[in-house]
Image (cartoon, rainbow, N blue to C red):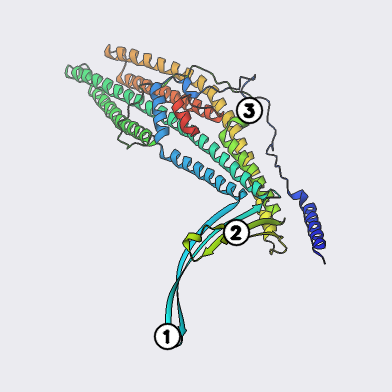
Amino acid sequence: MTFSSLRIVFLGAVLVQLTACSSLLKNDSQPEVFDIPSQWEDVSNDAPVEIRPWAEDFNDPLLNAFIDESITHNYDLEAIRSAMFMSHANARVNGADQLPQISGSFNPSRNKRNSSGGFGVSRGYVDTFRINLNVNWEFDLWGKIANRVEATELEYEASQEDFKAAYLSLAGNIGRSWAEAVAAKVLYQLNLDTVNNYKNNLEIIEQGYGQGIFTALDLRLMRSSLAQAENQLYGQEVVKNDSIRTLEVLSGHYPKGELVISQDLPKIQHDIPLGIPATLLERRHDVLAARRRLAAADHRVAEAKKAFLPNISLSGAVGNQTQELSDILNFNFFIWNIASSVVQPIFQGGRLWAQVDQTEASVRQAQAQYAQTALIAFQEVESFLNADLQLKKQLKTAQTSAEEGREAEILAQEQYQAGLTPIVTLLEAQRRSFTTQRTLIQTKMIQVQNRINLHLALGGDYAQSKTTKANVED
């Protein structure tokens, strides 16, 4: 068989292989696996798409400065940033496979040789200098390496989205923890005011008891109430200090419990522009990351299927070997060779088909993960949106309850000192007043935390700080 005949047979085999594998070279999984409604359940009309940063709802410069510092020094976020850089480096490593691989070597050596002639032995040394330049290049005729590179680049993009999601999650976690710490501080002050109020009442009752105005029962009930209030004060101090230390750890500082925080919880003054549900899939970084990984899995399938096709590579070398170092770069002594190879897999024991099955299973896994991530995103928005509406009603009733409770305490105090009501009524009024004020503070805290959660669920940022934006985009 002539060389021309062999070439025709080879090309025919390649065409047959391409025909058999033509259906294997394209994959485009569709991630939209459920119907998306045209509007949210708890809104009657469509609002603008743009989501305002949640920190604008609170207007707390102390909180904004603390979040900026925490994002710069938080160790968990730095670990995720490092993982993102690792993913970027991996993409660059795979991208290098598309280019020729060139290596050079220089090998000097000295050999000792013995030769005998007549009755004597002569010894000599031979110096040898060798220089080589080697080139290897795999032609990506079918795009297999391109699929691998595209997959790693998409995985890098997914890691970028992971970092952005972690950045926003950290800012939201700090905001929620800040609200919890401020609420604990306000509750501590409420407990302290209650203790001081009981102490003042106890002094009045002790004086009245000495004068025969109040009974021993009045005295003991007030002492019991004071002790209980002090007990609650000590417990609330622990909660306050723990919440402050939590904030210090989030900012990468030693938990000394000395962080200065705001004096009161912020008031929410704005409604959130929600946009339509479909836009959520383009804003949520965790959803975008899941979609990137699904696309990467598609390219992994294409790469696995193209492993059935021939590998075509080119290799070459040029070099010189001489006994004189001065001749090492003399081109008259150089030798070179070039060769190409075509390797067609024939029998791999089922390994290639197993790799295809493995990558296709990873696509199905990525599809399920994308769908679940999207569903959770919609669930979070619907849940936090409903809670936002209900918390507005709760806050209104809590404010009414606290105001009425405080007024009832004042009336009970006046009537008790005038001898018009027993001490039990006063103590019950004080207890109710404390409980309603505590409920009001906790409701404010929950409303602030839920507003942050709603912003995060919608994929919104926390602020427009140029410093933190630079940290995220680096």
Give the Cα distance between marks 3 and 1: 95 Å
Q: Tell me if I can see residue 455 in this picture.
A: yes
Q: Residues within 10 Å of mark 2 (few under 14, many from 20)?
A: some
* Residue type, mark 3 in image: Thr
The location of residue 32, given as percent across then percent down, is: 69, 36
The location of residue 323, given as percent across then percent down, is: 49, 66
Q: Which part of the image, by quadrant, shows the N terminus?
A: bottom right
Q: Residues within 10 Å of mark 3 (few under 14, many from 20)?
A: some
Q: Quadrant of residue 356?
A: bottom right
* Residue type, mark 1 in image: Gly
The tag on residue 30 is none
Q: Quadrant of residue 418?
A: top left
Q: Nearer the viewer, residue 109 or 206?
A: 109
Q: Nearer the viewer, residue 311 or 129?
A: 129
Circle 2 SS class: strand
The tag on residue 120 is 1
Q: Residues within 10 Å of mark 1 (few under 14, many from 20)?
A: few
The location of residue 122, given as percent across then percent down, is: 43, 80
The residue tagged 3 is: 279
| Mark in the foreground, 3 or 1 | 1
Circle 3 SS class: helix
| Mark in the foreground, 2 or 3 | 2
Instruction: Work out whether 190 lies above or below 295.
Output: above
* Residue type, mark 2 in image: Ala
| Mark in the foreground, 1 or 2 | 1
Locate residue 55 relative to residue 277 in the image: left or right. Answer: left
- Residue extending farthest to the front is 118
The tag on residue 317 is 2
